[in-house]
Amino acid sequence: MNRILILSVLLFLLGGTSLYVAHRLFRGLSCFWEGLKLWQVFTVILLLVLFAVLGFLRSMLPVSRSIKDIFAWVGGYGMGVLLYLLVFTLMADLLLCLPRLLKLSFTAHPLYHGFVTCGVFLLTVAVCLWGFIGGRQIDHVTYEISLEDKQDISDLKIALISDVHLGALGSEEHLERIVEELNGLKPDVICIAGDFFDTDFHSISDPEKALETLQKLQASYGVYACLGNHDGGSTYGKMLDFLKAADIRLLDDAYTVIDDRFILAGRLDASPIGGYGGRRRKDFSQMADWEDLTMPVVVMDHNPANIDEYGGNVDLILCGHTHKGQVFPGNLITKGLYTVDHGYYRKDAQSPQVIVTSGVGSWGMPMRVGSDCEIVLIRFSVD
């Protein structure tokens, strides 16, 4: 019953917003296109919505790979266009409601709605192009972490990425550049803080090529990963096999000691989509059984909502998940939801330091607006 209710609400919202956008576009386009019907505009909007939904569900559809790829491309790019048609239509209505209420003379002009619609289209095209280009760029960010009363690891470098979303639109081509740029940093350790996969292993079009690319990763002490909310489900076992074949060591509520100098731990996500084959996240105290308290402790935990679980026995927490909203106005939402949705944070001197990366890939729409794909380099100093 709950699923039916949620589905009904989602369909209502999709239908309602589609009709709203179609109606506003129709009013503007009909100024230039005599004979245009509302149902025609509404049909085009609904088709874009349908392709977006099919793009999300493509791995479950009994169709060929080429058809799935069409759903992915049309749905992914169409989703971005729909989002900004909605955003700019809403903004236009809000900005122009006062002139309409005041019945200013220009609002009565026959082409008034046409000019507004042209503005919405131009802004949508400009922002989407910016976002699609930005989604293929990778920014580099460096943080220096000061460690107090701990062993000196100032000669070590950690490279951090998260949210590769392998299997998402454009992710496999993006992977080659990610590997190349990670290797260029010459890191001692590479950490992948969750959401390496995009929910379904079968959404990867060429797993063998992706595996061959990942096997080129170079780090003095290896590549380590924790699981995110998209790294579970019915193909969870295939994901684990793939990571093992790629020589990526999974820390799933486990830890390892790197070069006898620092402890690296990884957590299971608390809310995996489809679950981890019956496994559940442990309480941190069940795994934090190390005895040498002089070693720095670094924890990978995909979701920064969990940072309050850790006390003074952890020095640094590495997170992802938020994408920093990925696209405006999503960054405003994540900023309100999380204590820290991106960057460096420390509550007080007794609390762990936290780094939240915006991720190196994208989810759903292959675009970035108001956020960047990024690779993080972490250096250490000892006070």
Image (tube, grey):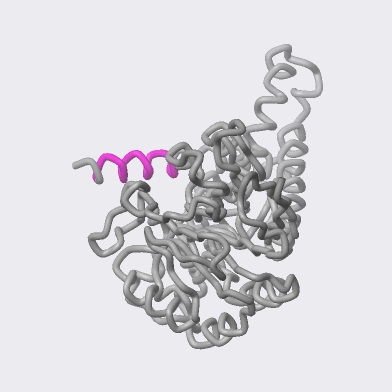
Residue 41 lies within the magenta run: no
Outermost residue toward the right?
106
Q: Which residue lies at the image location 63% right of the left edge and 39% below the top edge?
A: 345
Q: Which residue lies at the image location 63% right of the left edge and 76% below the top edge?
A: 220
Pick whichever, 146 or 122, lies toward us.
Answer: 146
Q: Quadrant of residue 339?
A: top right
- Count of number-bearing discs: 0
- Can residue 319 be seen here? no
Pick whichever, 215 or 53, lies toward us.
Answer: 215
Q: In this view, does 262 lie to the left or right of 84?
A: left
**Quadrant in the picture for the N terminus:** top left
Pick whichever, 69 or 231, lies toward us.
Answer: 231
State the extent of the magenta-drawn residues as a range. 4-15
- The x, y position of residue 13, in whole percent, is 42, 39
- The x, y position of residue 206, in whole percent, is 50, 84
- The x, y position of residue 65, in whole percent, is 44, 81
Decide whether the magenta segment is chiefly helix, strand or loop. Answer: helix
48 w.r.t. 83: above or below: below
Pick whichever, 287 or 295, lies toward us.
Answer: 295
201 w.r.t. 153: above or below: below
**Quadrant in the picture for the C terminus:** top right
